[in-house]
Structure formats: C-alpha cells, structure tokens
Image (cartoon, helix red, strand yellow):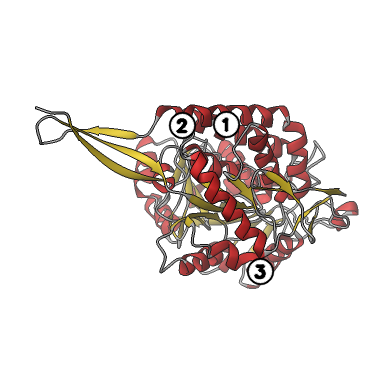
C-alpha cells in the first residue's frame, strides 16, 4: 500500500494518523493512505494561504498563465498514471478516468488564456476629460470542497479559475478519493506554483470541520455535494461576509417526443444515465416520453441498458463501473427497495451484482423502472446511481410540466425533430443546462455551468461567468486634465 503526503505551504507533509483509500471494485484491501491532518494543521494551511495570496495576487498574469500551461502539460504526460489512480479510488472506467484527466488539463489551458487577456470594461464618463473603467481583482483565500464522483475534474473546474484570477486556496478533497486531487496539486507544484497558493487538506471532516469552515480569513467557499451539507454550510455563513458557490443536487429529466429519432434518443439517454454508474451531477435519472412512442422507446432503452457490461473500471471491456463506496451502493439499493414498495416495476436490473469477484465490490445492476408516478419518491429524490425512472405523458405541455415539477433545476434534455418545440423547451425548462437531441451530461470547460432552484447558487462555474464568484469589481475614474 502506498503512503502519500499532502501539500501545505509548498511542502509535502505527513501526519501521525492516516486515512485508508479503498478500491470500490474490491474493498478488501486499501490501495493507499493519505494524512489525516488535525485541526491545527488546517489552521496552518490558512496561514500559508494568507501568505501565498500576498505573493500570488501581485504575480504577473503571464507568469500565472505559464504555470498553468506547464501544469497542463505535466498532467497530459502523466495521464496513464493519473487515470489509473482515478479508476482505483473512484471505480469509474479507465476510458472515463482518462477523459477526466485530459479535461482537467483543458481547464488549466483555458484559464491560462483567460488570465492573459485581463478582466474589465471601458466605460463612458459624463464628466469631460475623464476616462473610466472597471477592473476585476482577486478576493483572497477561498475554501474549495470537492466531491468523490468527479475527483479530478471538479477540483480543476474550481481551482483553475480562482487561482488564475490571483486568489489562494485551501482545498479539501473527498475522503474517499483524495489521490486525484493530490495529482492535480502536484502538477501545479511541479510547474512552479509559489508556496502557499494551494494547500491540500486531507482529513476526517468530523474532526476538522470547525477549523475548515470557521477560519476568519475565508472570503469564499465553493462546494459541490449534497443539499444537506450545502445547507449546513450556508447556515454557518449566515452572519459572515463570505461568498458561497454551491453545486448541489439534481433530478435531471430527458423528454422524448413522438417525432424523435427513437434509437438515437435511447442511446443518448442510456449514455447520460449510466456513464460513471449514474454518479454524475448531470446524469439523466427521469425520462418523460410521449405516450404514443412510450412502449417502443422503452423497448429500445432496455435493450441499450442490458447491453452494458458490469465490471471493474480497470477492465477495458467494462462499460458500467461499480459505485464509489459501500455506503453509496447500500443507499441506492435502499432507494430501489422503497421504489418497488411504492409500486414501481423493475424493467431490468434492480439489485446488487454479486457474481464472482464482484461480491467484494460496490456493484449495482443498471436499472430501469416503470409504473412510476409523480408521488413515487424515486421520481423526486436524487439517487446518484445507475437508476432510471420512466413515465408516459400526453403532449408537449405535459412533458414540460413534468420536467419542472421538481425542487431541482440542473439539467434537462429534449429529443425532437421539431425546431419550434426545441426552442420552446429551451425557453420553458426551469434548468441551468438545457440540451436538444443530446445528453444532459458533457458540458465543456468554456460553457457556464450551474443549476436553478435547489440545484445550486447564483454563482455559475466554468467559462467567464465563474469570475463573478472569484473576483471583485473596482471602478476607476481618471481625470486627465483640461
């Protein structure tokens, strides 16, 4: 078993206690261990970040861009090693892990370019002989809390823009998947990131939560995870002048209209639902089908799902990986059991996969449920697993109403050949991300990303929109005489 250190103040540090990292394909033996930092080391990380920010905010944006470009190159050079660790700790297939690794490098490249161009606007001034402009400045030390489902790309999505803008960060990766985040930190460190600009806290949340969330030097927190934890963080910040960016839950829907290309729609829905075993924020978990094509679409979809091959992510033949932890597996199985008790019909799957060596892993068969109503819990609550629920509706308006009948509003898709209905859907779906004839997943680095309602906060991620969170606006007026 490997022992890894974590990055704090520009140095790789150990601890007296350790956290074991498990492979969800076989949880019997830990694959690595990382430091379980105590609270005093979390405070020390903020000390380093405060000093790092003082240096980094004055570092040339061209130097920041150079570091990012070099770090992106290092990630691409190390892609096989990094992807293997993403698969080992998270369970996703090597193909998915490789794509995630390369996309993390893309985030660094994109924000390297954005760092070079500067942020601001030239404004007219009513006063004669005045020139006025706005400029964006970094806000300070930001806490980054990332989840286990996308353990490399989510840190890249969060850290790249805030560091490119000149901020410093304390980064808490998920306890189940710390190796991926440490790879990202190592690439930046090896590329020349100044000491203290990025500090990685690996530790048990219950032991360090107070030190992590209550440090007075925090000016922003960016969090991806459950609504329950997001709400707890929000309440904790209620009387503090701290920005909060939250990417929270979702119950994403795909609509299949009667004029859709049904085979193409079935392939797209299966990909969006069962990639990474459904453990994506934007995974499709509800399908709303116009009644005349419901039976035919269901037949095509079930055939796509039953063609998936369940196995360890390290096997190139695997197309459906294990869930990321025993706790996640057991939660999904409990949701399935409750759905059946409430009247849902299992069209395929519906149970754990414990065949052979899979008995030691976190496997759940890809599942499609029918006979689901708007009152069924699994139609309304996030499952975050390989589970898809189907409903038939009568007409376009009923389909849009079903999409919007949710507390969430992250992603939705519609499949149709009618351009008018496509645009109507884009206008009427109460979601931050809308797709037409494609998957609810797969939003590139330059595309603003984030949900409405209980799916997130007003601060978007990705693209230039993320600068609203990680920078402040200063207005400057210059009188040049006369």
Q: Which mark is residue 206?
A: 3
Answer with left or right where residue 465 lies relative to residue 358: left
Q: Is residue 274 left or right of residue 473?
A: right
Q: Is residue 219 left or right of residue 427?
A: right
Mark 3 Cα within 10 Å, few/some/many (few <14, many 20+)? few
Give the numbered dot on residue 209. Answer: none
- Contact check, label 1 and label 2, Cβ < 8 Å: yes
Q: Secondary structure at mark 2?
A: helix
The Cα atoms of the two marked residues, 3 and 2, are separated by 36 Å
| Residue at the extreme right of the image, as rendered | 356
Mark before the other along the chain sequence, 3 or 1: 1
Q: Secondary structure at mark 1?
A: helix
Depth check, front residue: 17 or 443: 17
Q: Is residue 349 above or below residue 208?
A: above
Residue pointed to by mark 1: 68
- Report x, y in % for residue 136: 36, 40
Residue 476 can be seen, yes or no: yes
């Amino acid at each position: 078993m490997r022992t890894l250190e974590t990055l704090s103040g520009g140095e790789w540090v150990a601890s007296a206690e350790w956290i074991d990292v498990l492979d969800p394909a076989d949880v019997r033996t830990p694959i690595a261990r990382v430091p379980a930092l105590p609270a005093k080391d979390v405070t020390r990380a903020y000390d380093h970040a405060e000093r790092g920010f003082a240096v980094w905010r004055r570092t040339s944006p061209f130097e920041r861009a150079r570091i990012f470009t070099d770090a992106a190159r290092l990630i691409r050079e190390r892609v096989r090693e990094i992807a293997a660790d993403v698969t080992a700790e998270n369970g996703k297939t090597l193909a998915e892990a490789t794509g995630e690794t390369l996309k993390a490098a893309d985030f660094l490249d994109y924000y390297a370019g954005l760092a070079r161009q500067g942020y601001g606007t030239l404004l007219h001034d009513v006063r004669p002989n005045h020139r006025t402009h706005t400029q964006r400045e970094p806000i300070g030390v930001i806490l980054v809390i990332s989840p286990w489902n996308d353990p490399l790309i989510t840190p890249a999505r969060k850290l790249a823009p805030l560091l490119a803008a000149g901020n410093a960060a304390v980064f808490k990766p998920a306890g189940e998947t710390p190796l991926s985040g440490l790879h990202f930190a190592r690439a930046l460190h090896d590329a020349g990131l100044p000491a203290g600009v990025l500090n990685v806290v690996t530790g048990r949340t219950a032991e360090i939560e107070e030190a992590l969330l209550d440090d007075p030097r925090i000016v922003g927190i960016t969090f991806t995870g459950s609504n329950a934890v997001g709400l707890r963080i929000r309440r904790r910040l209620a009387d503090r002048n701290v920005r909060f960016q939250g990417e929270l839950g979702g119950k994403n829907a795909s609509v299949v209209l009667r004029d859709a290309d049904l085979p193409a729609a079935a392939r797209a829905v299966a990909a969006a639902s069962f990639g990474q075993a459904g453990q994506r924020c934007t995974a499709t978990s509800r399908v709303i089908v116009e009644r005349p094509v419901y039976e035919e679409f269901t037949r095509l979809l079930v055939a796509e799902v039953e063609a998936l091959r369940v196995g360890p992510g390290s096997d190139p033949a695997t197309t459906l990986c294990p869930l990321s932890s025993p706790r996640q597996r057991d939660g999904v199985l409990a949701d399935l059991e409750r759905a059946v008790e409430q009247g849902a019909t299992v069209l395929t799957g519906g149970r754990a996969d414990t065949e052979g060596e899979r008995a030691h892993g976190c496997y759940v068969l890809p599942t499609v449920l029918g006979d689901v109503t708007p009152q069924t819990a699994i139609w309304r609550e996030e499952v975050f697993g390989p589970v898809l629920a189907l409903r038939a509706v009568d007409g376009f308006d009923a389909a849009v109403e079903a999409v919007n009948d949710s507390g969430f509003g992250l992603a939705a898709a519609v499949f149709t050949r009618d351009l008018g209905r496509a645009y109507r859907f884009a206008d009427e779906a109460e979601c931050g991300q809308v797709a037409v004839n494609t998957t609810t997943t797969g939003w590139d680095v330059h595309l603003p990303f984030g949900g409405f309602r209980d799916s997130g906060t007003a601060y978007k991620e990705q693209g230039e929109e993320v600068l609203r969170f990680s920078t402040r606006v200063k207005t400057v007026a210059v009188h040049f005489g006369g």
